[in-house]
Image (spheres, rainbow, N blue to C red):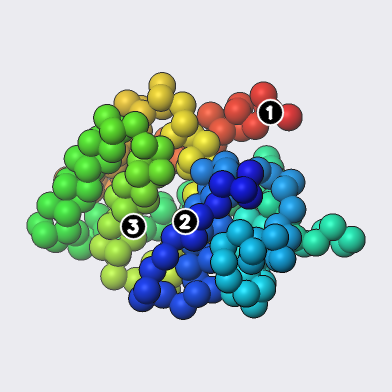
């Protein structure tokens, strides 16, 4: 589906980053499918740029795990695999549990207000029906929890992991039956943090991630 690509121009970003964001969004939305080749010349011509920013963007996509290089085939969009999902969620669970433990001890009223606002915004995006906006709103809610820890290293690691989780989050949000469950789970996490109840926060976080894992594994099983 490379023929549908259009460069998402941003005059404040280097050209390689603009190309990267354009390709990344196309992959995450499913406009460029798993297994599809990314040919530098074809992409450069379609986007109206030279091969250099395309080559650099593909390398950045490899670092995110969205693209892999196969001998004699070149760069292709990576498959969504069960193994990758399990690895990512295993690490995410451990780090998010650490995050909520820290936040329970130091959440400010300002940070709490921000979390409530982001949870409300997530609900709004569900009504709008745009999966990409839903995924971004979901990420912002979790990002606010990470940032509330004040632990720069933890925030950095979780942000890197967030990018790897994005494709799986998109798969989960495509199922409208999951939406109200997510709303309820966000509310449970938020209430536990507000009450500084570490045990409840840990339990709610664990259920939240476990349910996503179960659902996505089931969907991957259907496709496999």
Question: Residue 167: x and y, percent?
Answer: 54, 46
Mark 2 element type: helix
Q: Secondary structure at mark 1?
A: helix
Please name the residue shown 68% across and 52% down the image: 77
Q: Is residue 10 above or below residue 205?
A: below
Q: Nearer the viewer, mark 1 or mark 2?
A: 1
Q: Residue at x 26, y 62 (%)?
A: 148
Instruction: Please report whichever mark, 1 or 3, sits nearer to the chain's N-terminal start.
Output: 3
Q: Is residue 59 left or right of residue 131?
A: right
Q: Residue at x 63, y 44 (%)?
A: 1
Can residue 157 be seen in the rendering of this structure? no
Residue on which the image places disc 2: 162
Which residue is denoted by mark 1 in the rendering?
Answer: 223
Residues 199 and 42: in front is 42
Q: Residues within 10 Å of mark 2 (few under 14, many from 20)?
A: some
Q: State the quadrant of the C terminus.
A: top right
* Crowd band around label 3 with a 10 angstrom C-alpha radius: few (<14), some (14–19), many (20+): some
The span from disc 1 to disc 2 (Cα, nearest Å) is: 24 Å
Q: Residue furthest top?
A: 177
Residue 143's disc is 3
Q: Please report contact status of discs 3 and 2: CB closer than 8 Å, yes or no.
A: yes
Q: Quadrant of residue 214?
A: top right
142 versus 189 height, above or below: below
Distance of label 3 from label 2 (alpha carbons): 9 Å
């Amino acid at each position: 589906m490379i023929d549908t690509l259009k460069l998402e121009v941003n005059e404040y970003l280097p050209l390689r980053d603009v190309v990267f964001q354009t390709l990344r969004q196309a992959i995450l939305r499913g406009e460029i499918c798993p297994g599809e080749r990314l040919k530098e010349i074809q992409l450069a011509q379609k986007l109206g740029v030279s091969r250099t920013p395309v080559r650099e963007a593909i390398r950045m996509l490899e670092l995110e795990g969205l693209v892999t290089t196969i001998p004699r085939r070149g760069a292709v969009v990576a498959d969504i695999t069960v193994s990758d999902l399990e690895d990512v969620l295993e690490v995410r669970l451990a780090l998010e549990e650490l995050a909520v433990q820290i936040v329970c001890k130091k959440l400010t009223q300002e940070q709490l207000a921000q979390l409530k606002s982001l949870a409300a915004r997530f609900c709004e995006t569900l009504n709008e029906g745009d999966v990409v906006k839903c995924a971004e709103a979901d990420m912002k809610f979790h990002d606010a929890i990470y940032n509330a820890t004040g632990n720069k290293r933890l925030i950095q690691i979780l942000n890197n992991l967030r990018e790897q989780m994005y494709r799986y989050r998109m798969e989960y949000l495509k199922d409208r039956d999951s939406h109200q469950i997510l709303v309820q789970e966000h509310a449970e996490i938020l209430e536990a943090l507000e009450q500084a109840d570490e045990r409840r926060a840990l339990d709610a976080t664990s259920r939240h991630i476990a349910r996503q894992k179960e659902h996505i594994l089931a969907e991957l099983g259907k496709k496999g």
